[in-house]
Image (cartoon, helix red, strand yellow):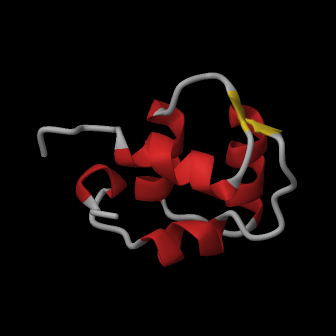
Amino acid sequence: MTTKGLGGHSPVDITHQLKGLHFPAQKQDLVQQAKGNGAGQDIMQMIDAMPEREFASIADVMKAMGELNPDR
């Protein structure tokens, strides 16, 4: 997986910020979990830019993040 849409973060960095999240999860669940885990502003902005939908797994979250800003 590339980090193009991940704001330069590795998938490990992002999954660490979402540790403890239960799936399926809504976007708001991602926001709450990341905040609770002390995610930085850059990761919070990435989550905010994600579509409002249900995510089936962390892989689903990573795929959605990877699709952000595809031209970067």
- Please give the name of the residue rendered at 62% of the width and 22% of the height, measured from the top-left corner: 52
Relative side of 21 to 59, left or right: right
- Please give the name of the residue rendered at 30% of the width and 49% of the height, measured from the top-left corner: 5
Which residue occupies the extreme left position in the image?
A: 71
Q: Where 1 sits versus 30, above or below? A: below
From where the camera sits, is residue 17 visible? yes
From where the camera sits, is residue 45 visible? no
- Please give the name of the residue rendered at 47% of the width and 47% of the height, measured from the top-left corner: 63
Relative side of 57 to 44, left or right: right
- Total marks shown come to 0
In x, y percent, where is residue 46? Answer: 44, 45
Relative side of 24 to 39, left or right: right
Which residue occupies the extreme right position in the image?
A: 22
In x, y percent, where is residue 31? Answer: 68, 45
- Please give the name of the residue rendered at 71% of the width and 51% of the height, measured from the top-left corner: 57
Residue 6: which quarter of the image?
bottom left
In x, y percent, where is residue 60? Answer: 60, 46
Relative side of 71 to 70, left or right: left
Residue 42: which quarter of the image?
bottom left
In x, y percent, where is residue 55? Answer: 70, 38
Q: Where 27 sits versus 5, above or below? A: above
The quadrant of the picture occupied by the N terminus is bottom left
Q: Where 41 sits versus 14, above or below? A: above
